[in-house]
Amino acid sequence: MPEESKHDGPEVDPLINAFADFGTTGDLDGAISDFIEENCEHFEGAEEGGENKLEWTDLHRQYVEMIELHLESFCKEHETTAETMFQLLSDVNSDSSLDQEFVPQVIKLCEYSFFFQNMKEAADIMAAKREANTLKSEGEFNLSGCYQLCTDLLNVTEVEKYYEFTGCPWYFRKIIVAASKRLSDIVVLHEPEEKLIFKYSLQFFGRKSKEYVLDDKLVESENMWGKVIQTKCFQDNASSKVRIQAVKPSYAPDGFNENTFEWEDVDGERLMVWKRRIYENMDDKEPLEDVSGDFIGPKLYFRPMSGKGRPAGSDFRDDRVCPGKVEVKEKAT
């Protein structure tokens, strides 16, 4: 791939790029996750915009002090200060030239909103795990449960090609590829024909929760990165899938992006699979392919926590490609 293709997207201060690398290779993210897990119980039932408890303020102070401690080695190596880094991180968050859809949460970690949201989501995930297994009913299509990512079935080339095609800047794309191997705390709460709630933790990006109302109506909602998009969601009983369609995204202005959740048998094991596909036109029946004939979009497989099979954490396929332009296969006319 041409070298210049690595520099897609607006320029970012070199310190920010170095900090993004620091977040993916050092122990900062692990320390943040440990702090949140140990203290999230104080945020159970918390509501954004509600009462701001004094204990939350004290915990946030401890959280910031912990981050500053981990920043010391980084700042020494790059001859800067924690204050300078926090200001640069703040500037990135307010830079309108950057697509905030792809700004990793590791860049936003100095904000109180990140701290609060991740504490709240961690507490919610704990509560959701307790609820998930109570929603299942024998004999009906129901995805409710707690899951582990099947890293042994993860193809990172698919992940990279997908985010490359959607316009994710290369310096954040490498973080997303690394993060995709560390998806954890996956909980699905599925009320058939009514709604699906998907909760998970994504390293460097924090904890996420999304509720999909399965009414097949076009609505405005935020995607997993907080960007407002037009979506419609429904349960396809003919194929036993939950379909979530984002209509007319910037990279497919006449089509849609579709996420599906379904069951799939892999080597005799029943797994939940999350597929992402891009359709060039609204009436297309087949998704876009690259020049090699592969669909543009990753498949992520999840093993039920009580399921049998290979142990979680086994080797994954690391079919990396150099960042570059994804070539789309032309349709026959």
Image (tube, rainbow, N blue to C red):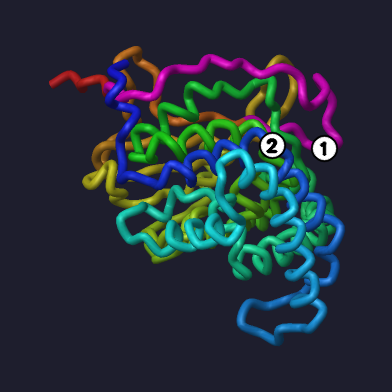
Question: Mainly helix, strand or loop, the magenta region?
Answer: loop
Crowding around mark 2 (Cα neighbors within 10 Å: few <14, some 14 to 19, many 20+) is: few
Q: Nearer the viewer, residue 204 or 79?
A: 79
**Can residue 312 be found in the magenta stretch?**
yes
Q: Is residue 240 above or below residue 133?
A: above
Looking at the rendered image, the disc whose residue lies closer to the viewer, 1 or 2, is: 2
The stretch of residues the image draws in magenta is 301-327
Residue 80 appears at what percent x and percent y?
Answer: 56, 50
Crowding around mark 1 (Cα neighbors within 10 Å: few <14, some 14 to 19, many 20+) is: few
Q: Which residue is mark 1?
A: 305
In the rendered image, which quarter is residue 118 located in?
bottom right
Q: Disc 1 and disc 2: Cα gap in Å? A: 28 Å
Q: How many discs mark residues in the rendered view?
A: 2
Amino acid type at mark 1 = Met
Q: Is residue 184 above or below residue 81?
A: above
* SS state under label 2: loop
User: For the point 33% across and 24% down, which residue is it?
Assistant: 324
Residue 3 appears at what percent x and percent y?
Answer: 31, 20
Residue 108 appears at what percent x and percent y?
Answer: 55, 58
User: For the point 75% across and 77% down, which residue is it?
Assistant: 57
Residue 232 appears at what percent x and percent y?
Answer: 42, 56
Q: Which residue is mark 2?
A: 26
Amino acid type at mark 2 = Gly
Earlier residue among tags 1 and 2: 2
Horizontal side of residue 96 vs 23, given as left or right: left
User: For the point 46% across and 36% down, which residue is it?
Assistant: 173
Instruction: Please say whether residue 190 is visible from this viewpoint.
Output: yes
Horizontal side of residue 127 vs 100, given as left or right: right
